[in-house]
Image (cartoon, rainbow, N blue to C red):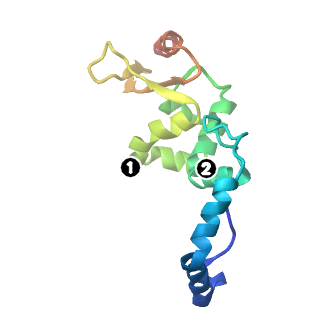
Protein backbone atom coordinates (compact mmCIF):
# COMPACT_ATOMS: atom_id res chain seq x y z
CA UNK A 1 0.00 0.00 0.00
CA UNK A 2 1.17 3.50 -0.70
CA UNK A 3 0.30 6.65 1.17
CA UNK A 4 0.80 10.19 0.05
CA UNK A 5 -0.16 13.60 1.33
CA UNK A 6 -0.31 14.84 -2.28
CA UNK A 7 -3.58 16.37 -3.43
CA UNK A 8 -5.20 16.52 -6.83
CA UNK A 9 -4.54 20.26 -6.86
CA UNK A 10 -0.77 19.61 -6.56
CA UNK A 11 -0.69 18.40 -10.18
CA UNK A 12 -1.43 20.22 -13.39
CA UNK A 13 -3.27 18.61 -16.32
CA UNK A 14 0.01 18.86 -18.26
CA UNK A 15 1.74 16.66 -15.68
CA UNK A 16 -0.77 13.85 -16.22
CA UNK A 17 -0.61 14.27 -19.99
CA UNK A 18 3.18 13.82 -19.79
CA UNK A 19 2.87 10.72 -17.57
CA UNK A 20 0.37 9.07 -19.92
CA UNK A 21 2.44 10.02 -22.93
CA UNK A 22 5.47 8.36 -21.32
CA UNK A 23 3.39 5.23 -20.63
CA UNK A 24 2.22 5.04 -24.26
CA UNK A 25 5.67 5.67 -25.72
CA UNK A 26 7.59 2.84 -24.03
CA UNK A 27 7.01 3.55 -20.35
CA UNK A 28 4.74 0.56 -19.85
CA UNK A 29 7.39 -1.68 -21.39
CA UNK A 30 10.02 -0.11 -19.11
CA UNK A 31 7.90 -0.86 -16.05
CA UNK A 32 7.33 -4.45 -17.23
CA UNK A 33 11.07 -4.92 -17.85
CA UNK A 34 11.86 -3.62 -14.38
CA UNK A 35 9.32 -5.96 -12.78
CA UNK A 36 10.69 -8.94 -14.74
CA UNK A 37 14.16 -8.34 -13.28
CA UNK A 38 13.03 -7.54 -9.74
CA UNK A 39 14.39 -10.09 -7.25
CA UNK A 40 11.44 -11.51 -5.32
CA UNK A 41 13.27 -14.51 -3.85
CA UNK A 42 12.72 -13.23 -0.29
CA UNK A 43 9.05 -12.40 -0.84
CA UNK A 44 6.58 -14.59 1.08
CA UNK A 45 3.11 -14.24 -0.46
CA UNK A 46 1.57 -15.95 2.59
CA UNK A 47 3.11 -13.57 5.12
CA UNK A 48 0.82 -10.89 6.51
CA UNK A 49 1.61 -7.43 5.20
CA UNK A 50 3.49 -5.07 7.50
CA UNK A 51 1.25 -2.87 9.63
CA UNK A 52 2.66 0.48 8.58
CA UNK A 53 1.66 3.90 9.81
CA UNK A 54 -0.42 4.31 6.65
CA UNK A 55 -2.25 1.06 7.45
CA UNK A 56 -3.09 2.24 10.97
CA UNK A 57 -4.14 5.68 9.69
CA UNK A 58 -6.73 3.99 7.49
CA UNK A 59 -7.88 1.68 10.30
CA UNK A 60 -8.16 4.59 12.73
CA UNK A 61 -10.11 6.68 10.23
CA UNK A 62 -12.89 4.09 10.26
CA UNK A 63 -13.12 3.88 14.05
CA UNK A 64 -16.03 5.55 15.75
CA UNK A 65 -15.35 7.65 18.86
CA UNK A 66 -17.83 5.46 20.73
CA UNK A 67 -15.37 2.55 20.47
CA UNK A 68 -12.79 4.28 22.65
CA UNK A 69 -15.40 5.62 25.06
CA UNK A 70 -16.99 2.18 25.48
CA UNK A 71 -13.54 0.70 26.01
CA UNK A 72 -12.87 3.29 28.73
CA UNK A 73 -16.12 2.41 30.53
CA UNK A 74 -15.51 -1.34 30.41
CA UNK A 75 -11.95 -0.81 31.67
CA UNK A 76 -13.27 1.39 34.51
CA UNK A 77 -15.62 -1.49 35.37
CA UNK A 78 -12.62 -3.82 35.58
CA UNK A 79 -13.24 -5.52 32.21
CA UNK A 80 -16.03 -7.71 33.60
CA UNK A 81 -16.52 -11.15 32.09
CA UNK A 82 -20.10 -10.18 31.26
CA UNK A 83 -22.00 -6.91 31.28
CA UNK A 84 -25.39 -5.49 30.33
CA UNK A 85 -25.99 -2.33 28.38
CA UNK A 86 -27.87 -0.93 31.40
CA UNK A 87 -24.74 -1.29 33.55
CA UNK A 88 -22.66 0.47 30.90
CA UNK A 89 -25.20 3.28 30.53
CA UNK A 90 -25.16 3.75 34.31
CA UNK A 91 -21.40 4.42 34.11
CA UNK A 92 -21.36 6.38 30.84
CA UNK A 93 -21.01 10.14 30.77
CA UNK A 94 -21.44 13.00 28.30
CA UNK A 95 -21.58 12.11 24.64
CA UNK A 96 -21.35 8.36 25.22
CA UNK A 97 -24.35 8.44 27.58
CA UNK A 98 -26.36 10.39 24.99
CA UNK A 99 -25.31 8.04 22.17
CA UNK A 100 -26.21 4.91 24.17
CA UNK A 101 -29.52 6.38 25.33
CA UNK A 102 -30.57 7.26 21.76
CA UNK A 103 -32.72 4.35 20.55
CA UNK A 104 -31.71 4.89 16.92
CA UNK A 105 -28.20 3.66 17.82
CA UNK A 106 -29.36 0.34 19.30
CA UNK A 107 -28.52 -1.70 16.19
CA UNK A 108 -24.95 -0.33 16.18
CA UNK A 109 -24.26 -1.22 19.80
CA UNK A 110 -23.41 -4.93 19.26
CA UNK A 111 -20.85 -3.91 16.62
CA UNK A 112 -19.36 -1.26 18.93
CA UNK A 113 -19.25 -3.75 21.80
CA UNK A 114 -17.50 -6.28 19.56
CA UNK A 115 -14.81 -3.74 18.71
CA UNK A 116 -14.28 -3.40 22.49
CA UNK A 117 -13.89 -7.15 22.94
CA UNK A 118 -17.46 -8.10 23.91
CA UNK A 119 -19.96 -10.35 22.11
CA UNK A 120 -23.71 -10.69 22.66
CA UNK A 121 -24.54 -13.98 24.37
CA UNK A 122 -27.89 -15.44 23.40
CA UNK A 123 -30.13 -16.94 26.06
CA UNK A 124 -31.25 -20.15 24.38
CA UNK A 125 -33.85 -20.68 27.11
CA UNK A 126 -35.76 -17.57 25.96
CA UNK A 127 -37.55 -17.17 22.62
CA UNK A 128 -36.18 -13.66 22.11
CA UNK A 129 -32.66 -14.61 23.23
CA UNK A 130 -32.62 -11.96 25.95
CA UNK A 131 -31.74 -12.46 29.61
CA UNK A 132 -33.85 -11.16 32.48
CA UNK A 133 -31.54 -9.04 34.64
CA UNK A 134 -32.87 -6.81 37.41
CA UNK A 135 -36.41 -7.58 36.23
CA UNK A 136 -35.83 -6.43 32.62
CA UNK A 137 -35.22 -8.36 29.40
CA UNK A 138 -31.91 -7.30 27.93
CA UNK A 139 -28.89 -8.58 26.03
CA UNK A 140 -25.78 -9.63 27.90
CA UNK A 141 -22.36 -9.10 26.39
CA UNK A 142 -19.47 -11.36 27.39
CA UNK A 143 -15.76 -10.95 26.76
CA UNK A 144 -14.80 -12.43 23.41
CA UNK A 145 -11.58 -13.92 24.83
CA UNK A 146 -13.59 -16.36 26.98
CA UNK A 147 -14.68 -19.81 25.87
CA UNK A 148 -18.36 -20.22 25.01
CA UNK A 149 -18.99 -22.13 28.24
CA UNK A 150 -17.28 -19.38 30.26
CA UNK A 151 -19.30 -16.73 28.43
CA UNK A 152 -22.53 -18.54 29.34
CA UNK A 153 -21.40 -18.99 32.94
CA UNK A 154 -20.62 -15.26 33.16
CA UNK A 155 -23.99 -14.35 31.65
CA UNK A 156 -25.83 -16.63 34.08
CA UNK A 157 -23.97 -15.05 36.99
CA UNK A 158 -25.46 -11.66 36.04
CA UNK A 159 -28.94 -13.12 36.07
CA UNK A 160 -28.44 -14.38 39.62
Q: Is residue 78 left or right of residue 144?
A: right
Asked which quadrant contains residue 131, the reply is: top left
Q: Nearer the viewer, residue 53 or 123?
A: 53
Q: Nearer the viewer, residue 139 or 42?
A: 42
Q: Which residue is mark 1?
A: 104
Q: Is residue 40 left or right of residue 142?
A: right
Q: Which residue is mark 2?
A: 59
Residue at left offset 54%, top offset 14%: 147
Residue at left offset 64%, top offset 62%: 33
Q: 69 above or below 10?
A: above
> Which image quadrant: the N terminus?
bottom right
Residue most extreme to the left: 127
In percent of width and height, residue 122 lies at 38, 21
Give the label on residue 93, or none: none
In percent of width and height, residue 135 lies at 39, 21
Q: 30 above or below 147?
A: below
Amino acid sequence: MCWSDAKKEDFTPEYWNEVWSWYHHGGLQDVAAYLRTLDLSCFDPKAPPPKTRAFWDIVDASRAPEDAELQDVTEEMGNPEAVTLAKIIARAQGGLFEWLADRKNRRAIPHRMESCGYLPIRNDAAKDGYWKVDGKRQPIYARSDLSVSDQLRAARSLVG
